Image (spheres, helix red, strand yellow):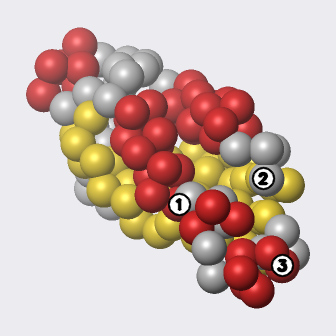
Amino acid sequence: MGMIQLENMEFYANHGCYKEEQIVGNQFLVDLTLETNCDIPMKSDNIEDALNYLKVYEFIKEEMDIKSHLLEHVAGRILDRLYKEFDQIDKAIVKVRKMNPPLGGKLESVSVTLSR
């Protein structure tokens, strides 16, 4: 068993409950941990045998481009998409962070973490 981690993926997106957030947008960071069997690609050194994390990134980017009100919705869509596209995933954990959220005070980020 192995873990593949994509950390601090940066996206500019228009997620949020408030109209202004959906117009102006904000900076988001996404962390992903995938558990998968790495035995075959570890020996073969062949991308065809591995969980292709370039494709993983591309699918996450596509989901981040879809406007949503809630971080829970974004994170859930990311998990749904990854499980649909990759049957090698045994477990996935995704964390979506909104940087500098408009909450009326100084706050670095707010985040939602989902696992399946």
Whether residue 38 is situated above or below residue 36 in the rendered picture: below
Q: Say which amino acid is labelled 1.
A: Tyr
Separation (CA) of disc 3 from disc 1? 16 Å
What's the mark number on residue 89?
2
What residue is pinned by disc 3? 39
Whether residue 76 is situated above or below residue 8 in the rendered picture: above
Rendered image quadrant of residue 24? top left
Q: Position of residue 51 (x, y in %)?
A: 65, 60
Observer-nearest of 26 and 8: 8
Observer-nearest of 44 and 35: 44
What residue is pinned by disc 1? 53
Which residue does the image show at 39% across and 33% down from the upper left? 62
Q: Position of residue 64 (x, y in %)?
A: 39, 35
Observer-nearest of 103 and 60: 60
Locate residue 81 relative to residue 67 in the image: left or right: right
Q: Secondary structure at mark 1?
A: helix
Estimate how packed mark 3 is, as few (under 14), some (14 to 19) or many (20 or more) residues with alpha carbons within 10 Å. Answer: few
